[in-house]
Image (cartoon, helix red, strand yellow):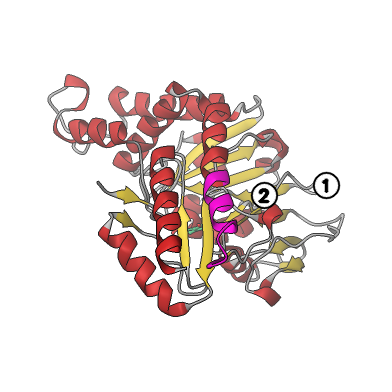
Amino acid sequence: MIHNFNAGPSILPKEVFEEASRAILNFNETGLSILEFGHRTPMFESVVSEAMDLVRELMQLDGNKEVMFLHGGASTQFFQVPMNFLSKDKTAAYLDGGVWGSKAIKEAKLFGNVEVVASSKDRNYSYIPTGYTLPDNAAYFHYTTNNTIEGTQMQGIPSSSVPLIADMSSDILSCGMDFNRFSFIYAGAQKNIGAAGVNLVVADKDFLATGNTAIPSMMDYRQHVANGSMLNTPPVFAIYVCLLTLRWLKKIGGIPAIEKINEQKADLLYSTLASLPMFNLPVPAQDRSKMNAVFTMHDPALEKLFLTRCEEEGMVGIKGHRSVGGFRVSMYNAMPLSSVVDITDLIKDFANKHA
Ligand code: PMP
């Protein structure tokens, strides 16, 4: 059996893969593949509208929010956000909490002034910075809710009158929060929502109205809203996989149900690692991500042995990102508790044998 701990693209529910593969051959008994009919057909329009409705329902969005499915992955949002909401005469506040956030900062600087309010770069982004104040006049405050590479996660939402913009690529739909507090949310789909190639965007209508207009149509959120995310040919299959994953999440009880499971998985893995002196957890307990658990071993020679043992037992995708080293066990929504039980059993057994 394969346990897929990849950081993204990553595990999705088995029933999503099954249903998606059926739709490639015969979508909803139409005799057509999901890949071969027009996006401006009732068949595909119903896919998009049901997916948008499910996002609204699962995230409990108020009536002032727009939902979009856009091309380009989260990296496109790094520049599309400032292209819409920043200009040379404005300042945006950014939290430099990880590699992905620092990439967003780099792109924003092309469009206007950027004030980095705090950074954890001094310790390789191994903690969530605190104790900063946001400039009142900032156009917006951008931060990453979960730092996928470094295994840190923000707890709670900063209280501020500055419009909040969050990159939620690696923890969206994994835990409850008041999503309506954000002016703008984006997330690449390939972790908790569906297949790579599409972004989920949730934006406040009033905030959208403040955006720049002298920008290319494909970059302009308002035009995407006006066209129901079909300004051009959308990534049809990727959106369909999102629909299937959203249906699955609703069926199992939505965010409250998955949050409980995610907590169980993270508690089990972190408490096991913390109890074994062989392992090192670089992130302080209060900042640890429930999606991506990062750990190293004090003895680098043992790291090799551990990786080989994991591979032999079908635990894939646990090698840490090259900037952090060690290991990263990603436990997105679709990861069953049983796989985390299996890897913690392996960890305990490995520690016994090599103590
Ligand atoms: N932000 C975060 C938090 C991510 O984890 C990633 C990808 N792993 C990205 C942005 C970039 O996403 P994409 O590859 O879809 O551009």
Residue that carries the numbered disc 2 in the rendered image: 165
As drawn, 257 above or below 312: above
Residue 276 sits inside the magenta stretch: yes
The three-letter code of the residue at mark 2 reads Ile
Q: Left or right: 119 with respect to 232? A: right
**Highlighted magenta segment, given as a residue range:** 267-279
- In what element is the residue under mark 1? loop
Q: Left or right: 354 with respect to 164? A: left
Q: Left or right: 245 with respect to 288? A: left
Q: Left or right: 202 with respect to 311? A: right
Q: Badge 1: how crowded within 10 Å, few (<14), some, or many (20+)?
A: few
| Image position, residue 126 (x, y; %) | 64, 67
As drawn, 321 above or below 270: below
> Looking at this view, is 335 or 91 the one in front?
335
Q: Which of the two discs, 1 and 2, labels the residue nearer the N terminus?
A: 1
Residue that carries the numbered disc 1 in the rendered image: 160
